[in-house]
Amino acid sequence: MKSYRKELFFKTETRRAYINITNEVEQAISNSEIIEGLVLVNAMHITASVFINDDEPGLHRDFEKWLEGLAPEKPYSRYEHNGYEDNGDAHLKRQIMGREVVCAITNGKLDLGPWEQIFYGEFDGIRSKRVLIKIIGE
Ligand code: ZN
């Protein structure tokens, strides 16, 4: 079995952001030369997510409204976590949006559904963050 590992780096200019990383994952699969296998893509931070959904700006605004309704950023005093930090909301947003995705690789390509795209979800940005891509197969 072959394996391949790559990290992606992010430093968003805003506290929250959704970044389509499908092309980066495709590139990693191409570099891995794995034809049949699985790719794991996970956020390496507990205030960021990797998830699959539609690349549609209205949906991303809906995510923002929905998540702010569930876990508003402010007031910071709302969260017991916010002693030395102000990112209690970001931990909760990450929890509901998920840590990682696992996708099939078929014929050397990402085997996604017709509208599926892979996103990095940032909930506590303006700092350096990483995503891990791990590919296994033959
Ligand atoms: Zn924290």
Image (cartoon, rainbow, N blue to C red):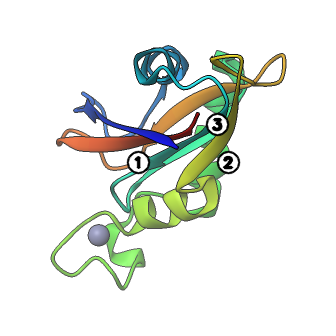
Q: Mark 3 sits on what residue? A: 37
30 is higher (above) or lower (below) than 42: above
Query: Disc 1, ligand 1: is the CB inside 8 Å?
Result: no
Residue at 50%, 14% in the rendered image = 23
Asked which secondary structure carries label 2, the reply is: helix
Residue at 49%, 24% in the rendered image = 25
Asked which secondary structure carries label 3, the reply is: strand
Q: Residues within 10 Å of mark 3 (few under 14, many from 20)?
A: many
Q: Mark 2 sits on what residue? A: 66
- For marks 1 and 2, the one nearer the N-term is 2
Frontmost of labels 3 and 2 is: 3
Please, what is the three-letter code of the amino acid marked with disc 3? Gly
Q: CA distance from mark 3 to mark 2?
A: 35 Å
Please, what is the three-letter code of the amino acid marked with disc 2? Trp
Q: Mark 1 sits on what residue? A: 123
Q: Quadrant of residue 116?
A: top right
80 is higher (above) or lower (below) than 20: below
Query: Disc 3, ligand 1: is the CB inside 8 Å?
Result: no
Total marks shown come to 3
Front in this rendered view, residue 82 or 45:
45
Residue at 43%, 24% in the rendered image = 32
Percent coordinates x, y for residue 113 in the rendering: 83, 24
Left or right for 116, reference 5: right
